[in-house]
Amino acid sequence: SQQGEEDPQALSIQEGENATMNCSYKTSINNLQWYRQNSGRGLVHLILIRSNEREKHSGRLRVTLDTSKKSSSLLITASRAADTASYFCATDRTGANSKLTFGKGITLSVRP
Amino acid sequence: GAVVSQHPSRVICKSGTSVKIECRSLDFQATTMFWYRQFPKQSLMLMATSNEGSKATYEQGVEKDKFLINHASLTLSTLTVTSAHPEDSSFYICSARDYGQAGSVYGYTFGSGTRLTVV
């Protein structure tokens, strides 16, 4: 079952602007991950934030995690046309039976 | 970094035939792999968890006799869509789990997906 719920469902911005995408989840987690998918392709791992972390940076990406609200946000700064893709959050729990549970995804369009 | 190779990338088959999709971890051993199905403009739906040397664990609603999974080695899992029908047309993606990529958490590497069209 889908746990993560991203919003907005679709986002269109101008190149150079920042893009903020939000994700909410329902159960306890070990970590939350963000992935990117170009049309018709596999998923590329962007960033992982553990449940005991509140913020993490990687290049132009900034992710936050609020476990009390069961939510996360992904910020892409200074967006580029090449950032156009679908973005998914996914949660992972602990243990040998861990597996990713994906949200519905956000379609980001960056206009040149 | 970890690489997962998935083949074929596209396949067209006739209704009633079977199609096999391969998922290989190229530079690491994966005792656990996952198979997802994705419909256009939708998210990934987990079909089954493939465990090396044992039976796959299927998600509720997924027909195990239709979607046969074999994980005979630590680097290869296969998904066979048996007696395929047009409604099986979809994008199938595999993922391999690797412990320790991110230090004490599991890392997941995805294949590039297989576009199956049943005519």
Image: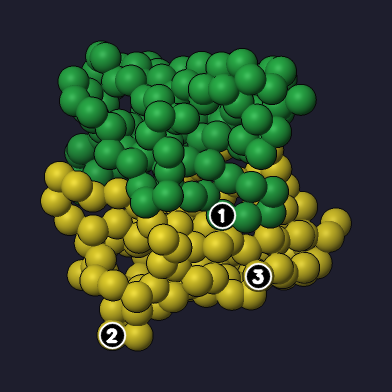
Check if mark 3 and mark 1 are on a common chain. no
In the rendered image, which residue does mark 1 sit on? B43
2 and 3 marks in contact (CB < 8 Å): no
> What is the letter of the green chain?
B
Residue located at (38% from left, 34% from top): B64
Q: Is residue A75 left or right of residue B28?
A: right
Is B20 on the left or on the right of B109, as rendered? right
Q: Is residue B47 visible?
A: yes
Say which quadrant the N terminus of chain B sits in.
top left
Q: Secondary structure at mark 2?
A: loop
Question: Which mark lies nearer to you, 2 or 3?
Answer: 3
Query: Who's the residue at 56% across and 49% down the image?
Result: A36
Please identify the residue farthest to the right as the structure is shown: A112
Q: Chain of mark 3?
A: A
Question: Which callout, 3 or 1, points to the residue nearer the camera?
Answer: 1
Please state which of residues A100 and B28 is positioned toward the viewer in this rendering. Answer: A100
Q: Is residue B49 above or below residue B118?
A: below
What residue is pinned by disc 3?
A9
Q: Colour of chain A?
A: yellow
Amino acid under disc 2? Ser
Look at mark 2 in the image and give the residue it sits on.
Answer: A68
CA separation in Å, label 2 and label 3 = 23 Å
Any part of residue A57 in sight: no
Position above or below: B116 against A45 = above
Judged by depth in the image, the label closer to the viewer, 2 or 1, is 1
